[in-house]
Amino acid sequence: MLQISKNREVLIVPGKYASISSVARRPHYKLLNRIFIGFLVFLILCLFLPWTQNISGRGAVTTLKPDHRPQTVHNVIAGRIEKWYVQEGDYVKKGDTILFISETKEDYLDPNLVGNTKEQVDAKQLELESYSDKVNSIELQAQSLTTERGLKLQQAQNKIKQAYFKIKSDSMDLEAVKTQLRIAQTQYNRSTALNKEGLKPLTDVEQKRLNLQESEANIITQENKLLSSKNELINAKVEINRVQAEYAEKISKAKSDKFSAISTQYSTKGQVNKLKNQYVNYNMRNGLYYIMAPQAGYVNRALLAGLGETIKEGTAIVSIMPAGYDIAVETYVEPIDLPLVHRGAKVRVWFDGWPRIVFSGWPGLSYGTYGGRVVAIENFISPNGKYRVLVSPDSETKKWPKQLSIGAGAESIALLETVPIWYEIWRNLNGFPPDYYQPEGNELSGKKK
């Protein structure tokens, strides 16, 4: 110190003044110090108490199965409203009639449309059967022509054989006549020579000449017969070709008629199937005039009103809430918390309108919360910028209230690792996320960040 100031520091000695000594000797100050020290020790001990890390979410009550959620009933065909069979708040069973509509399209206005279509189907069916009979008759005709062609060919073959035999016979006859001609010529020459010597009369020579001329005439006749037999052979061969060509044409025509009949038969069969399809469609369309309840439930709201109103296909008619459903909660978590959530994770849930006292770090001390487990996690971000998680009731804990209504608000906390309180305070002060962990049964050992 430079000791420049005129003010001097004065040291106060506690024992110098009686008032200070009197106050210091009061007993409640010692008790206050003990209380303060004990409170500090208690706070330090509390820092080592277990704290369950959690992820909070906000959502609403829904159903576990898609077919248990409220649904709207739509009409399949366009029509005009004719009669209502229900009102809002009514309980309907599966198959109960909700609304009756009438036809508006001109293609289906005929009241006898189904009956007329049935008659067309029957007529086409008879036509199909007639074509089937026609195909069978043409097939029999073709078989008959094939059999007849075989017989004709056998007949022609026999004629050819006969012609061959006749040619052979005529050839032998011709050789015999030639032999007779040579003999007649020899006898004539011998008679002539003997007549010149006076040994034979002239009448014998003339007789031999006559025999010679007859033999010559027989040769010509026999040659004509042989040529005629050869012509018959040629004609028999030509007859075979003619028979084959004639019956080939007839059989080809029969086959052509058969294929034409088969083609017409298949075409008629297609028309029959088309008419049957139309008949079934008309029958089913008649059943679509009555709009039925798809499942048992309560009519929440009628989306249309009045009579005579024309509606298009797929128009929403009424909204139905199923009578029986498995309740669940759809909650939304931040993207940073999504890796910490897994299927089967335990969740504590509380609902709007139900009294509760919530200690997020000590779920066992909370009141008015209900246990749940994660059953589904959506991997696509929702329009609100969060990820959707579906929570179902935990069968090992207290049952959820039966009075819950679909759409009621709900909040949830997903339970994570259990850590000391000092660690949780330190984590929040540094802005670290909750510890990453692996669910039980996972073979991979999780590492903490």
Image (spheres, grey):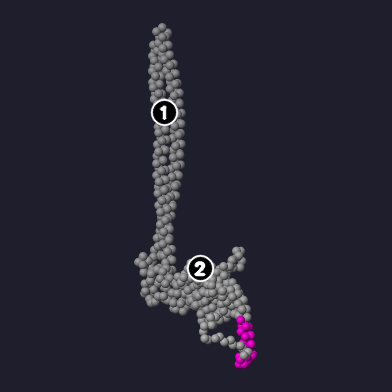
Q: Quadrant of residue 86?
A: bottom left
Task: Say which mark, if any, is on residue 229.
Answer: 1
Residue 345: x %, y % from top left = 57, 71
Q: Which amino acid does label 2 sit on?
A: Glu
Residue receiving disc 2 = 378
User: Image check: 264 left or right of 430?
Assistant: left
* Residue closest to the eye, 254 or 37: 37
User: Image check: 330 left or right of 196?
Assistant: right
Pointer 1: residues within 10 angstroms few (<14), some, or many (20+)? many
User: Image check: 382 left or right of 103?
Assistant: right
| Above or below, 397 relative to 113 | below
**Residue shown at 43% from the left, 74% from the top:** 318
What span is colored magenta in the figure?
17-40
Image quarter hosting the N terminus: bottom right
Residue 15: x %, y % from top left = 63, 89
Image quarter hosting the C terminus: bottom right
* Residue closest to the eye, 11 or 67: 11
Secondary-structure class at tag 1: helix
Magenta highlight: main SS: helix
Q: Distance from label 2 to label 1 (Cα)? A: 103 Å
Secondary-structure class at tag 2: loop
Q: In which quarter of the image is residue 213?
A: top left
**Residue shown at 42% from the left, 9% from the top:** 194
Taking the view exactly as shown, the residue that stands out farthest to the top is 197
| Above or below, 222 relative to 257 | above
Residue 123: x %, y % from top left = 40, 58
Q: Quadrant of residue 275?
A: bottom left
Residue 226: x %, y % from top left = 41, 25
Taking the view exactly as shown, the residue that stands out farthest to the left is 106
